[in-house]
Image: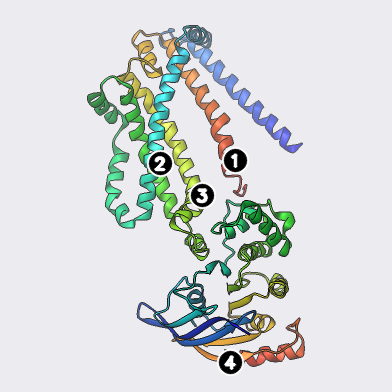
Amino acid sequence: MSLAIELQDVSKAFAGQRVLENISLTIGQGEIVALLGASGGGKSTLLNLISGLLSADSGQITLQGLPARQFTGWQQIGYLFQEDRLLPWRTVEQNVHFGLENSALSAAERQRRVSDALALVGLASFARHWPHQLSGGMRSRVALARSLVAEPQVLLMDEPFSRLDPHTRSSMHNELLRIQQLTGMTIVLVTHDVEEAVVLADRVVVLKPHPGRIHLQAPLHLPRPRIATTPVVNEQIRLLRLEV
Amino acid sequence: MKHFSHVLSVIAQRLILLAIFLVIWWQAAQHLPPFVLPGPAATWQALIRLWHSGTLVQDVGITFSRVLSGFLLAAVIGTLAGLLLGASQRLAHFCEPLLAVFNTVSSAIWAIFAIIWFGISDATTIFVVFMTAMPLILTNVWQGAQNVDAQFVELARSFRMSRWQTLRKIYLPTILPYFFSGARLAFGFGWRVSLVAETLGSSDGIGYRLRQAGDLVQTSQVFAWTLLLISLMLLLEGGVLKPLERHLFRWKKRS
């Protein structure tokens, strides 16, 4: 398995406050990794460092074999925020198109990709709707399609489903796993929900706060689909909860 | 069906209001000399005379082109300045008193200055319209620029968009509703002050004709002009601005 992301002794401080200290982490191609921890643990900061939205104070970040400073393939890294952040003045279709507007693709190719991404999340028939006409779950799907439309090899997610009701959230989990199976992309997911981490991830990284550091890494070998109410999955959730 | 009957009821109400107004006007005119208050019939005749005079279209056109020139100038400069203030907090803080001063100076004062500086010319009216409309547009655009959602800017950044792209795709669509309400206000004000400016510093246009009619105590003609202007503004509002607004902001939730 080749490495998608590698962090070596990465530290970050905001206004003298140490947020992350000596984080070392490797993430393989096609792996689903959950960063789990209480709020204030620097999970989102870690994600922002990987995405290049923030730069590290010290340490080395390597993306697909290249140091972050030399890395140019940012198009291959998608970012899904906690909020859906759909632009209200754009239709569903135009919102998804936003994810391609910084690429050199032809108009026809963009249109094709937008249709494909909408079909992938099951919203092909809502292409012309306005965001305010959609439910929370549908808005989440549009945001997901906007991240997927550029066909990223790495998808970074910052508690993307935390605002959805439990039922919609679990259907989004299945959706995400199905799409990951199809594309083989690497997923790094930030969450404070142990159940979400166990249901989705190949490996869970538990972070402890003040300053943010890696407490433990737990590979999960449970078969999929993982249903939170089955005994094995439930036991895993219970064990991890003790560590958080 | 419900919608249809609602529209009918609104039309009926408007017609009744118009009828009441005409009756009161007509009754009042019966008891007053025509140079104080001409009746509806006299006003109608004056309107027809105006229509046949030949300079009507020309006068309306001239005034309209002056208002439009001043307004467009105000829109361009007001928008750019508003964006600039929105981009730099320090500059905005520095310039804020200036804006307060602009907003308190009466249009009549600008008109007097305009006559001193530009004499009897198109520039006088354009200047007054500009000075009235510009601060309104500037203030609104500035306010819009301050209301740009930081989350959307971050979203654009996550897609590695340039400053220019962010300006075009995030800032401008956010500011557009603010600009539109400012521009609408500015156009209304500009239109009204243009007449004041024309009565003082012009030798043609609607304002000039109004003063002429006033000086000669042709009250019915003043009434005719007033009626004409009101219908023109209503037409512009209902025929251009309202539909344009509905199209531009069709993405907004109807409440």
Dot 2: chain letter: B
Q: CB under 8 Å between callouts 2 and 3?
A: no
Q: Which residue is mark 1?
A: B247
Residue B59 x, y percent position in the rendering? 43, 16
Residue B119 x, y percent position in the rendering? 25, 21
Amino acid type at image mark 2: Ile
Dot 4: chain letter: A
Sequence-wise, which precedes: disc 1 or disc 2?
Answer: 2
Q: Is residue B158 left or right of residue B113?
A: right
Alpha carbon separation for disc pair 2 and 3: 16 Å
Q: Which residue is mark 2?
A: B137
Dot 3: chain letter: B
Q: Does residue A20 appear anywhere in the picture?
A: no
Amino acid type at image mark 4: Glu
The quarter of the picture where residue B79 lies is top left
SS at mark 1 in the image = helix
Alpha carbon separation for disc pair 4 and 3: 47 Å
Dot 1: chain letter: B
Alpha carbon separation for disc pair 2 and 4: 57 Å
Instruction: Bin the neighbour count of mark 2 within 10 Å (Cα to Cα): few under 14, some 14-19, many 20 and up.
Output: many
Residue ID at (47%, 56%)? B166
Give the number of the mark in front: 2 or 3. Answer: 3
State the quadrant of the N terminus of chain B.
Answer: top right
Confirm whether circles 1 and 4 share one chain.
no
